[in-house]
Image (spheres, rainbow, N blue to C red):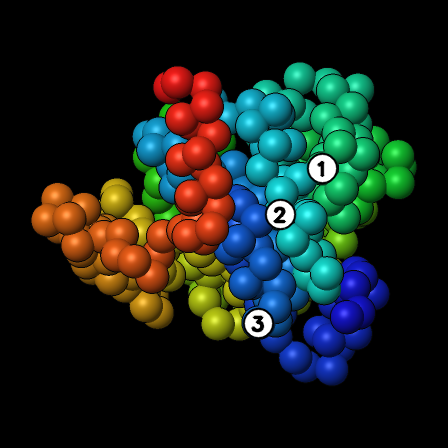
Amino acid sequence: MHKLTIKDIYDKVHEGKKIALMTAYDYPIAKLEDTVGIDIILVGDSIATTVFGRDDTLNVTMDDMIHHAEAVSRACDRAIVIGDMPFMTYQTSIRDAIFNAGRFVSEAKCDAVKLEGGRNYVAQIEGIVNAGIPVMGHIGLLPQSYHRYGGYRVQGKNAEAALGIIKDAIAIEKAGVFAIIAESVPENVTSLIKNYVSVPVFGIGAGSNCDGQIIVVNDILGLNFGKTPKFVKVFKDLKPIISEAISKYVYEVNSVKYPTHEYEYHMSDVERKRLEELLKKINL
């Protein structure tokens, strides 16, 4: 199976094809995504809310991310794997940004990293790119700036805010990002962003006029236990399916219907007799 590269992504975009991106946090889900044709898999810091059950993404550590990203990378033969830089792992300095991005590549075997922010983080992006590590940008709604926004809100709804997002896109493209995620941005603002940058723009809640879409895997499977964003389509609600399977298991254990003979291991009659003889000899 051909391992995709950034050039492959560019070629697909230039051919007018859309790119499918999705999050993954463990080996089995990443393996399924890779097998069915997801192009880019993001090991997102959204793991905080989707897997760890936290209220926001602010307390995920590099060790958390490396642990899960390594498992995802091991599962992928085709997809590009991107590690999401956690809160305060790149904001503090250029050195910290390069060091932590390097951990994603050297320890977790990721192909690239993603970090949130626009004009304020140009120096960090340049530093990571100059160190030889591809960077995906992220503008619009920035979950790590949750407190600044007063919650998860659509960004760029007025002219001044939209202009700021466009300036962010231009700045991080100049800094060297190979692609940009636009999150929770009005569709007509996304269209304007694409007029000002040449790198692919991938959307999450940013409309259809993007070069591709990214989504949280738990959301499309109905495994979101919080508020579901407007842009999320549940493609298959697994909650009732999983709940039914677990309920059946509980029932069969309690009623001694599982395990039955077919699910048990059995010693041969010959070996059973030999064991009985051995037990008699040692007076157990």
How crowded pointer 2 is (Cα within 10 Å; few <14, some 14-19, many 20+) is rated as many
Secondary element at image label 1: loop
Mark on residue 187? Answer: none
For residue 194, what is the image quadrant?
bottom right
Q: Evaluate whether residue 84 shows in this view.
A: yes
Q: Residue at x 71, y 74 (%)?
A: 13
| Closer-to-camera residue (82/208) | 82
* Residue 92 x %, y %: 66, 17
Amino acid tagged 1: Ala
Q: Residue at x 54, y 63 (%)?
A: 32
Secondary element at image label 2: helix
Amino acid tagged 3: Val
Amino acid tagged 2: Val
Q: Which residue is mark 3?
A: 36
Secondary element at image label 3: helix
Q: Residue at x 65, y 53 (%)?
A: 75
Inter-mark Cα distance, 1 to 3: 22 Å
Inter-mark Cα distance, 1 to 2: 9 Å
Q: Which residue is mark 1?
A: 108
For residue 221, what is the image quadrant?
bottom left
Q: Evaluate whether residue 97 shows in this view.
A: no
Asked if labels 3 and 1 touch by Cβ distance under 8 angstroms, the answer is no
Q: Which residue is mark 2?
A: 72
Judge left or right: residue 55 versus residue 248.
right
Task: From this view, report whether residue 112 is shown above or below residue 146.
Answer: below
Q: Residue at x 35, y 69 (%)?
A: 235
